[in-house]
Image (cartoon, coloured by chain):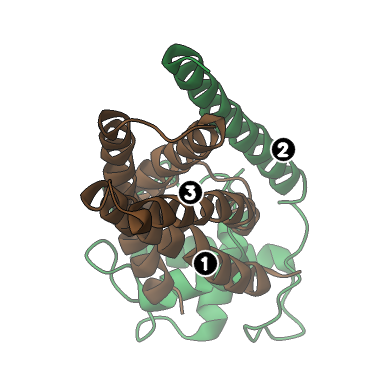
């Protein structure tokens, strides 16, 4: 595959972790608000699945991005900024997915809040990564 | 599972993920360096048939010194702009950056250099190992 095809693959795959991380944040926040109602547990389960699928999608996004840049881990300018936010976001997403898998039972409300804070940080990192990635996509049509 | 074990497992998984990224990145970068001496396969820029690679590179060096050296340094090792040695991007992308520039960082050279001169610049950049 040439670099244009990899660029298109990267552009398509990155939307899974970005969208699903935000969806997970939305669901888990809803679960915390409606903690004592059945809908709260449904939202928590939905948020967990969204995060796991997002984490799986992030692996494809990372591999396609690395192939696209021929192994460039940082680079210069906007690519560097994309990576500076992207690598912590990827690491945090994987960590949260493993955290979520290891939670066999419903956590306490405090535990849910402790899970929600890094998820919020993930949302910020994802937004910054997506912003600089979008700038790159516009700079190299 | 205890919270400490969960935290340790999560941390371990993220470190493993980042380690895999670094390993894959180094393999891809090494592979790209190993093939960087090969002639570019992309033929999107017009180069006259009678032009040899050596003359194209020499022409590219002159153009580089006129247009690029004041930002990237006369030896292309970087000054205001980045070091251009061992670039691991495609010719298509180099041509796009030279032509369109980078917003807020590098001007566009599309009007100053026609495609054949951009091809010469790219040929010169390939000599910078």
Relative depth, front residue between A68 and A100: A100
Percent from the top left, x then y, of residue B85? 53, 45
Say which residue appears at 62% left-offset and 43% top-offset: B129
In this rendering, position of residue B92 left or right of residue A33: right
Which of the chains bears the disc numbered 1?
A: B
Few, some or many residues within 10 Å of mark 1 (<14, 14–19, 20+): many
Q: Which chain is brown?
A: A
Whether labels 3 and 2 share one chain? no
Q: How many residues crowd around disc 2 within 10 Å: few (fewer than 14), some, or many (20 or more)?
A: some
**CA distance separating discs 3 and 2:** 33 Å
B59 or A94: nearer the eye? Answer: A94
Identify the secondary structure beneath mark 3.
Answer: helix
Q: Which residue is mark 1?
A: B94
> Which of the two marks, 3 or 2, is nearer to us in this view?
3
Q: Position of residue B77 (x, y in %)?
A: 42, 41
Quick one: SS at disc 1? helix
Residue pictured at 62% horizontal, 83% vertical: B45
Q: Residue at x 63, y 40 (%)?
A: B25
To which chain does the residue with label 2 belong? B
Q: Which mark is residue A48?
A: 3
Q: Residues within 10 Å of mark 3 (few under 14, many from 20)?
A: many
| Between discs 2 and 1, the one toward the N terminus | 2
Foreground label between 3 and 1:
3
Residue A128 appears in which quarter of the rendering?
A: bottom left
Cα–Cα span, label 2 and label 1: 22 Å
Query: Is there CB contact under 8 Å for labels 3 and 1?
Result: no
- Give me the disc on residue B27: 2
Which chain is green in the rendering? B
x and y percent of residue A25 in the render? 33, 53
Q: Total of numbered circles in the picture?
A: 3
CA gap, disc 3 and disc 1: 42 Å
Residue B3 lies, in percent from the top left, at 43, 17
């Amino acid at each position: 595959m040439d670099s244009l095809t990899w660029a298109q693959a990267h552009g398509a795959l990155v939307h899974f972790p970005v969208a699903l991380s935000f969806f997970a944040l939305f669901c888990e926040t809803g679960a915390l608000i409606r903690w004592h109602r059945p809908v709260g547990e449904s939202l928590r389960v939905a948020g967990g699945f969204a995060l796991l699928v997002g984490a799986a999608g992030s692996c494809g996004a990372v591999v396609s991005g690395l192939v696209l840049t021929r192994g460039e881990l940082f680079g210069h300018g906007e690519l560097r900024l994309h990576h500076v936010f992207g690598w912590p976001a990827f690491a945090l997403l994987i960590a949260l997915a493993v955290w979520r898998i290891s939670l066999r039972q419903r956590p306490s409300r405090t535990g849910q809040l402790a899970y929600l804070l890094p998820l919020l940080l993930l949302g910020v990192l994802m937004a910054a990564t997506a912003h600089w990635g979008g700038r790159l996509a516009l700079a190299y049509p | 599972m205890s919270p400490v074990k969960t935290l340790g497992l999560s941390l371990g998984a993220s470190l493993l993920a980042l380690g895999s990224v670094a390993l894959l990145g180094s393999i891809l970068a090494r592979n790209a360096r190993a093939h960087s001496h090969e002639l570019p396969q992309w033929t999107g820029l017009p180069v006259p048939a009678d032009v040899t690679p050596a003359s194209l590179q020499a022409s590219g060096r002159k153009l580089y010194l006129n247009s690029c050296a004041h930002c990237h340094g006369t030896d292309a090792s970087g000054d205001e702009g980045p070091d251009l040695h061992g670039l691991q991007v495609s010719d298509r992308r180099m041509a796009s950056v030279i032509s369109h520039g980078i917003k807020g960082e590098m001007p566009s050279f599309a009007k100053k250099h026609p495609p054949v001169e951009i091809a010469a610049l790219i040929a010169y950049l390939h000599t910078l190992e």
